[in-house]
Amino acid sequence: MAQIISVGKPHPFGNLPQDGACLKIHTHGLIMVLVCPYPKDQEIGYFEELVSYGIYKSDTFPYGLIIWKFGHNWLVETPFNILKDDEVSSFLSEDSNALSRVLIDEKGIVRSLNAAGLQWGFIKELQEIWGNESLNWPEYETELGVVIQQSSTQKLWNKTRKYMHKEYGNVSNN
């Protein structure tokens, strides 16, 4: 049975981080869940305005880290904690570019629910990264911690190939 997600109601996702984002897979694409304790109206408004997104990766960090840009300049990192999900193989073979975004407050209540289509280049890049069997995924969380400690989200964003949300244009390197 499909889970129903409604603004103003408790979320159906089970265990989530107390603060921060995670990515899940559903039958029609991806779900980005952001837990934001005590979100202000301005933050909710920013979350509803997806501007661009990208995947940070480098020679020393080939795993990738998704960064989303919302509103004025709110950057949110989303690690690939999805890799613990049994649905990864289905995502690798699907042709879905849907993204559902859910903002949850400190009490587990859904404060915002949005959907968007992602650019196909972004989806293909994710599929290539997640499908790369030569990567040492057990070391991912350790390597991710090093990357996050060594650079701010803004510095990582500056080095990311960006995909603009279709309302704002096409691929950019800014």
Image: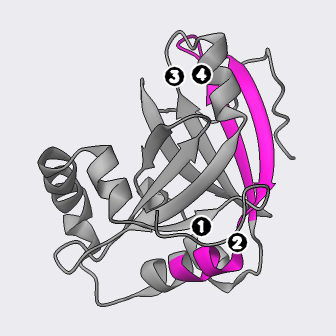
Mark 4 vs mark 3: in front: 4
18 sits left or right of 45 in the view: left
100 falls in the magenta region = yes
Mark 2 vs mark 1: in front: 1
What amino acid does circle 4 point to? Answer: Glu
167 sits left or right of 71 in the view: right
Question: Which mark, residue 23?
Answer: none
**Extent of the magenta region:** 98-125
| Other residues around mark 4 within 10 Å, as few (<14) / some (14–19) / many (≥20) | some
On the image, the x and y values in percent for residue 106 come to: 52, 13
User: Do the CB atoms of the residues marked 4 and 3 lie less than 8 Å apart?
Assistant: yes
Disc 4 designates what residue?
43
Q: Is mark 3 on a helix, strand or loop?
A: loop
On the image, the x and y values in percent for residue 54 come to: 50, 63
Q: How far apart are marks 4 and 3 (CA)?
A: 9 Å
Q: Distance between the residues labelled 2 and 4?
A: 24 Å
Question: Which mark, residue 163?
Answer: 1
What amino acid does circle 3 point to? Answer: Cys
User: Do the CB atoms of the residues marked 2 and 1 lie less than 8 Å apart?
Assistant: yes
Q: Quadrant of residue 61?
A: bottom left
Q: In this view, does 172 lie above or below 102?
A: below
| Other residues around mark 2 within 10 Å, as few (<14) / some (14–19) / many (≥20) | some
Q: What element carries label 1?
A: strand
On the image, the x and y values in percent for residue 34 come to: 55, 34
Disc 2 designates what residue?
119
User: Do the CB atoms of the residues marked 2 and 3 lie less than 8 Å apart?
Assistant: no
